[in-house]
Structure formats: structure tokens, C-alpha cells
Amino acid sequence: MKRLLLILACLSTPILADSQSDYETGFAAFRNEDLVVALQYLERASDQGHVRAQVLLAYILDKAEENHQALALYRKAAETGDAEAQMGLAMMLAAGEGAEVDNTAAFSLLLKSADQGHVPAMLQIYQVLEQGAMGQQANQAEARNWLEKAAAAGDAEAKALLRKNAKPLTAGE
């Protein structure tokens, strides 16, 4: 039994290494704006279950308006608990890209992402609550709470907004 487990472990290692290598090659190609090469490597890594590759590939496909493919990849990665994927999926659902608009699911995904410390999600929640968007009631106090969380996480934009709007909120805002 131990021997079988050792053989299985040895056989699975190259697959994991290959998906990581493919992701790194794809990411480097993306940074160098070589989308043809990026897509080739990211698709291969994504097909092997590499979550970061799924998220980056979904982002690229979303920008290319390949919404159904992007949505499917974001959904797959979000199911693993990836905060960036949860935010990407939330934004697509809120905009009705690749699916019907679903503000309830979108806001729930933003909260999950933000609760993991994903600062862009915190800032998005701040904007949603500040404006009363995504089916949410405007709530200045809760919006400020999310802005403060983003600032506490070191976000310069959040810190600047807090300095700009330094007046304390009154109860009921």
C-alpha cells in the first residue's frame, strides 16, 4: 500500500509542476503583451486545474468579451475559494455578462472576497454601499467601514478617500 501511494505521488508531481510552469510562462507572456502565447499556456494550466491560471485566463477572456467562457472559468476558480475569482465573477454577474444580472449573488461574492482580505473587493463594496447600487440600500456608515478596512490593509486610494472625507459620520448615516 505504501509503495502504491509513493508511485502515485511521483506520478502526480510532474503534472503539478507542469501546470505551475505553464502558468508562469503564460503570465510572463501576458505581462509582455503576447496574448497568443499567454492563452496557449494559460489554457493548458487551467485545464489541469491551476486556479491562478483560470483566474488570469478568465480576466483575459472577459476583456475580450468572451463572456460565457470567462464566466465559467471565474465560477470554477471561485468555487475553490479564490478571492480574485470571486470578485471577477461578482462583477460579471452584476453587469449581466455571460449570465442574467444577479445582484444578490454578486454582492454575496464580493463579501466573500473582501472577508478574505481582497482589497479591491473592499473598495467595490464601499462604492456599492456609498451609491446604493447592486440592489443594496445606500449605507454611509457601512460604506465607510469597508473603506476603513481597505485603508487598514494599506490601500493608498482608501487612505486618500478617508483623508478627503475626514468628517465623522453621524449615527443614522
Image (tube, rainbow, N blue to C red):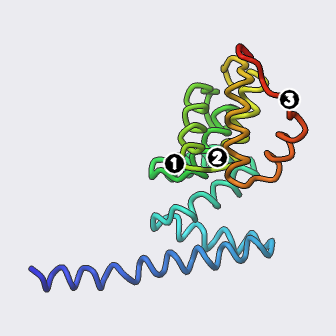
Instruction: Provide residue 84's location: percent of width, then percent of height.
Output: 61, 52
Q: Amino acid at mark 2?
A: Gly
Say the numbered circle drawn on residue 88.
2
Residue drawn at the location 37% of the way across and 81% of the way down: 13
Label 1 sits on residue:
78
Residue shown at the point (81%, 47%) measured from the top left: 159
Between the C-alphas of marks 2 and 1, the distance is: 9 Å
Distance of mark 2 from mark 3, alpha carbons?
A: 32 Å
Q: Earlier in the sequence, mark 2 or mark 3?
A: 2
Query: Image quarter for residue 106?
Result: top right
Q: Residue at x 71, y 57 (%)?
A: 60
Residue 154 horizontal/vertical position (percent): 72, 55
Answer above or below: position of 134 versus 23. Answer: above
Label 2 Cα neighbours within 10 Å, binned few <14 / some 14-19 / many ≥20 = many
- Crowding near pointer 3: few (<14 within 10 Å), some, many (20+)? few
Residue 95 image offset from top left, x and y in percent: 71, 33
Which of 157/172 is in front?
Answer: 172
Q: Residue furthest left?
A: 1
Q: Which residue is mark 3?
A: 167
Picture coordinates of residue 87, whole percent (x, y): 62, 44
**Which one is earlier in the sequence, the residue at label 2 or at label 1?**
1
Give the residue type that dot 1 points to: Ala
Q: Quadrant of residue 168?
A: top right
**Image quadrant in which you'd find residue 167:** top right
Front disc: 2 or 3: 3
The residue sitting at 53% across, 64% down in the picture is 46
Q: Are marks 2 and 1 in contact (CB under 8 Å)?
A: yes
Residue 3 shown left or right of residue 125 in the figure: left
View extreme (top): residue: 172
Amino acid on which the number 3 mark rests in the picture: Lys
